Image (cartoon, rainbow, N blue to C red):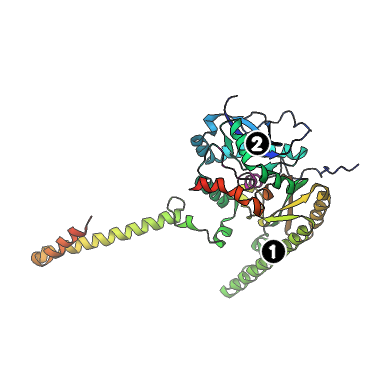
Amino acid sequence: MIGLRYVYAVCRPFSTPLQAQLSGVAGDPPRLLTHHGLVAVVSHVPEADFAEEPLRAHLEDLDWLTGVARAHQGVIDALTTVTTPLPLRLGTVFRDDSGVRTMIEARKESFRHTLDRLEGRVEWGVKVFLEDAPKPEAAAPAARPASGRDYLRQRRSQTKSQDELWQRAELFATQLHETLSRVAEDSRLHAPQNPALSGASGRNVLNAAYLVPRAGSEEFVEKVDQTKGELPGIRVELTGPWAAYSFAGDTAPESASDEERPNAKERS
Amino acid sequence: MTTPGRLPDPYGQGGGANLADILERVLDKGIVIAGDIRINLLDIELLTIKLRLIVASVDKAKEMGIDWWETDPALSSRARRDELARENAELRERLAALEELEAGRDQEPSSTASAQEQAHREAP
């Protein structure tokens, strides 16, 4: 297929073949483009969807975006089973292979630096939810307030127990984060998720990512599992292993300028 | 035998990793490289903000002081109502002023003439 080049990730050459049925964001299987000892994982994508105008329009379409996001993640996931990929942000598109090669050439030092830092490591996602408390009214229908003062008293005790629950959840999340940070090499705190998009019940108190060596992953997972069911009303969710998405963007101070300059140019 | 590459089975991936988990990673994390296809970075940032509003809870966003959508009539029905109420009040005010002017002209044509002229000059 003639078209544009969609880049998923950059990694070091690897020997294990990618799974055969893997298809990329537009159905084209990911190909490996090797340059300067680095591999760009690339799919051909149609200009009709990935040129500037259509891409911008598509990005506003949550259904389209969902499909591309899942396909992008599918390729990164497949790469994670055979190597340590540096995931690129969704929608990194070049005109042709030579554009991809030029990009590799310009950033090879920074890629190597980050690849060395992340080699053999994966990301685990941990979320803590405070389960929705059963409505006190429903639990005790007999306790109807007899007067306005009773009503206020009931309200106050409800609010108080809700506050206490919230504080307990926060404390639990803080302690869990400290425990896991000790096992992990690095961590990132993300914004809490909205149930509308995540489909998860309860209130998201902690949404964190941890960078863990593959060899230490079992211990990490055990640590998380131990906390499950520790506190009533609190739910702990583990996702992963992910490619080190949350840790790929950081650049060491010496390579920061190399990383920033092209973007700075874009903005002006 | 344990190999260094051995990993516990994936948790929650494929079926279980929710859309928010995937979007927050592929859209918000990972390395940012300006490709040949230049999607205006500002657009991308706007998109990210929009998604963040979906991803992050509204309460949290308010806590962080992000509440601009509340005053944007295109995004908030309350803002639209406020906007309508404001416009309504303004129109009423102008109508009242005109009625007053009208009444004044009927009674004292000469003294209100200058006021009327002034009103005309001020009107766009």
Q: Is residue B94 left or right of residue A54?
A: left
Q: What crowding class fits label 2: few (fewer than 14 Cα within 10 Å), some (14-19), or many (20 or more)?
A: some
Residue farthest to the right, as pictured? B1
Residue A11: which disc?
A: none
**Residue in the image at 58% along x and 49% along y:** A260
Q: Nearer the viewer, residue A73 or A233?
A: A73
The answer, for residue A239, to whether it is visible in the render is: no
Q: Amino acid at mark 2?
A: Ala
Residue A84, quarter of the rendered image: top right
Q: Nearer the viewer, residue A43 or A39?
A: A39
Magenta span contains residue A24: no
Residue A233, quarter of the rendered image: bottom right
Q: Which residues are magenta?
A: B19-35
**Residue in the image at 80% along x and 43% along y:** B9
The answer, for residue A113, to whether it is visible in the render is: yes
Where does the image place residue B5, in percent across and percent down from the top left? 82, 42
State the residue position of label 1: A170
